Image (cartoon, helix red, strand yellow):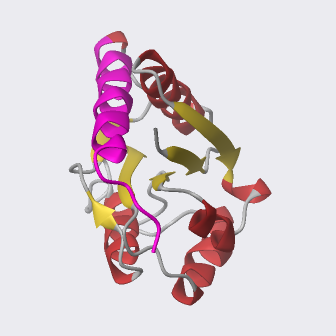
Amino acid sequence: MADIVLIYASMTGNMEEMADAIAAGIRSAGGEVVVKSVMDANASELERYDAVLLGAYTWGDGELPDEFLDFYEEMDDIRLTGRKAAVFGSCDSCYPEYGAAVGLLINKLRETGADVVLPGLKVELSPSTEEAEACRRFGSEFVKLAASGAARS
């Protein structure tokens, strides 16, 4: 079974709800996951895990939230070749770019050599009951993909 880390940023609690539901999906599929706020993590930690999940809400006109900026920059100094990865985010359709932070993180993970194995999961603001279930399925599917061939390099 793959070692999985899930790191997220949450201001209003929407992202925390998503992270909790995704972690529940991972655990329901028999996986184990370490869940951390980005404020309590550093990018070099990612190299210790077989699989990585990152979650961020989109701020302003398509930026990462401030609390994710240092972590994002630190990712320039790590290599995640051979690790499975996925990204999720809370989005707001009133902005011109819907969920741009998800795309930014997917691109950064690919730059580190990670294998992004699922399309980014985007939820409008706070997850509804159906969206929370989609988050659980996302976690369950991710643990299956992470377990199939996750290898550190």
Which quadrant would residue 46 be assigned to in this image?
Answer: bottom right
Give percent across and percent down for residue 153.
45, 75
Q: Residue at x 50, y 22 (%)?
A: 27
- Tell me: residue 87, above or below residue 31: below
Residue 93 seen anywhere in this rendered image of the structure = no
User: 88 or 112: nearer the eye?
Assistant: 112
In screen coordinates, is 26 left or right of 48? left
Q: Residue at x 30, y 42 (%)?
A: 122
Residue 89 seen anywhere in this rendered image of the structure = yes
In screen coordinates, is 144 left or right of 153? left
Please name the predominant secondary structure of the magenta segment in the image: helix
Farthest residue in the left direction?
119
Farthest residue in the bottom direction?
77
Q: Residue at x 35, y 46 (%)?
A: 146
Give percent across and percent down for residue 45.
67, 65
115 inside magenta stretch? no
- Tell me: residue 114, above or below residue 140: below
For the record, the magenta segment spans 130-153
